[in-house]
Image (tube, helix red, strand yellow):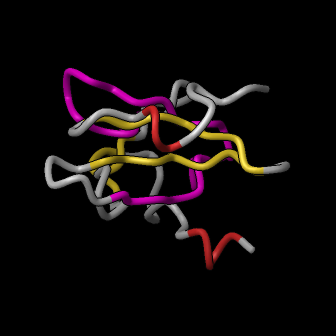
């Protein structure tokens, strides 16, 4: 499964995209100041890969509708109960 973009450099300000890193899929959000926020793209509910929702500015899971804050990874809507994992937690 390919990522949305080839690298973080392709992500515009205020947007997110899924980037492939080896065997991992990473949810990368570039805030309006240009700072990158990276989390595992695997939903903490059942492991589906989240997608960027440009209207709501959130990471959304296509499987069961969980939504996550793009900067912190915190749950905005369930059924997921825990935040998206940081890359350190995923290793």
Indicate left or right for 3 with 16 as reference.
Answer: right
Which residue sits furthest bottom? 88
Whether 9 is drawn above or below 56: the answer is: below
Q: How many labels does the image show?
A: 0
* Residue 45 visible at all: no
Name which residue lies at 39% across and 35% down.
11
Q: Nearer the viewer, residue 42 or 54?
A: 54
Name which residue lies at 33% across and 26% down.
53
Which residue sits furthest front? 9
Whether 33 is drawn above or below 63: the answer is: below
- Indicate the quadrant where residue 55 lies: top left
Whether 44 is drawn above or below 67: the answer is: below
Q: Quadrant of the N terminus?
A: top right
Q: Which of 16 and 46 is in front in this view?
A: 16
Residue 29 place in picture, x, y as percent? 36, 47
The span picked out in magenta is 36-60
Name which residue lies at 47% across and 52% down.
80
- Indicate the quadrant where residue 3 lies: top right
Name which residue lies at 83% across and 50% down.
22
Indicate left or right for 31 with 68 as reference.
Answer: left
Residue 54 place in picture, x, y as percent? 27, 24
């Amino acid at each position: 499964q390919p990522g949305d973009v080839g690298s973080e450099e392709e992500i515009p300000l205020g947007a997110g995209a899924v980037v492939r890193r080896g065997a991992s899929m990473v949810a990368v959000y570039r805030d309006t100041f240009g700072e990158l926020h990276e989390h595992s793209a695997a939903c903490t509910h059942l492991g589906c890969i989240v997608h960027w929702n440009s209207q709501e500015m959130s990471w959304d899971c296509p499987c069961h509708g969980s939504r996550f804050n793009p900067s912190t990874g915190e749950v905005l809507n369930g059924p997921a109960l825990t935040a998206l994992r940081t890359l350190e937690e995923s290793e």
